[in-house]
Amino acid sequence: MNFYDEQSMTTRELFEKFFPGREDVIRLLMEPITYANGSTLEDPAISYGIVFSNFMSKGVFTFEGGTDKLIGLMEKELEKSGVDICIKADVTRIDCQGGKVRGVEVNGRMIRTRAVMSNANLNATIFNLVGEKYFDRGL
């Protein structure tokens, strides 16, 4: 990939072009990149290429046991700390007011809370779930 190449292809389209129908290969290639910076299959392919090439030039560590084991360990740790977890839940909005989180809309129901941990990538969390207006550009 070249930074100056045409930029409209998504990572999903890139994988489908070279590995059609190979979800196992896609997962293998996405796991370390998703861990590193929250990349998704809908991000521009060039951003995947840049991060992947940086990883490969210096070596990469992938969590032993894979994503499922890591998520399970995270779930246990969070529950031990008294955190309520919603899995397979459609979060449509994080409600903020006065610079603070007030709740999260999950499966059409507002759940009041003072803190939310998002597993969406940073752009999706800021621009789709919270809203850019709630972030101070001066920080």
Image (cartoon, rainbow, N blue to C red):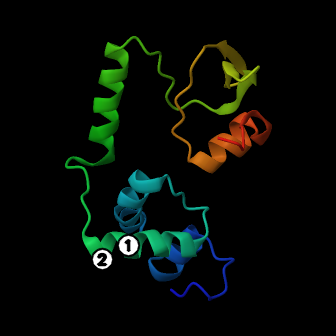
Residue 17: x and y in percent read 53, 81
Residue 77 visible in image: yes
Of residues 69 and 82, the one drawn nearer to the viewer in this rendering = 82
Crowding at dot 1, Cα within 10 Å, few <14 / some 14-19 / many 20+, comes out as few
- Residue 21 can be seen, yes or no: no
How far, Cα to Cα, is label 1 from label 2? 5 Å
> Residue at image x 58%, y 46%?
122
* Numbered disc 2: secondary structure: helix
Q: Is 100 on the left-hand or right-hand side of 77? A: right
Q: Which residue carries the number 2 mark?
A: 57
Residues packed near mark 2 inside 10 Å, few (<14), some (14 to 19) or many (20 plus):
few
| CB contact under 8 Å: marks 1 and 2 | yes
Q: Quadrant of residue 139?
A: top right
Residue denoted by label 1: 54
In this image, 65 relative to 87: left or right?
left
Between 82 and 58, the residue placed more toward the observer is 58
Q: Position of residue 98 (x, y in %)?
A: 76, 20
Q: In this rendering, is residue 105 above or below 134?
A: above
User: With 44 as the anchor, is 34 left or right in this view?
Assistant: left
Residue located at (35% from left, 26% from top): 75
The residue positioned 65% from the left and 46% from the top of the image is 124
Q: What's under tag 2, amino acid-wise? A: Ser
Secondary structure type for disc 1: helix
Which one is nearer the viewer's eye here, 126 or 30?
Answer: 126
Q: What is the x, y in percent for residue 29?
A: 38, 66
* Residue 51 percent across, percent down from the top left: 44, 69
Q: Residue at x 40, y 11 (%)?
A: 82
Amino acid type of disc 1?
A: Asn
The quadrant where residue 126 appears: top right
Q: Looking at the picture, does residue 106 appear above or below residue 22?
A: above
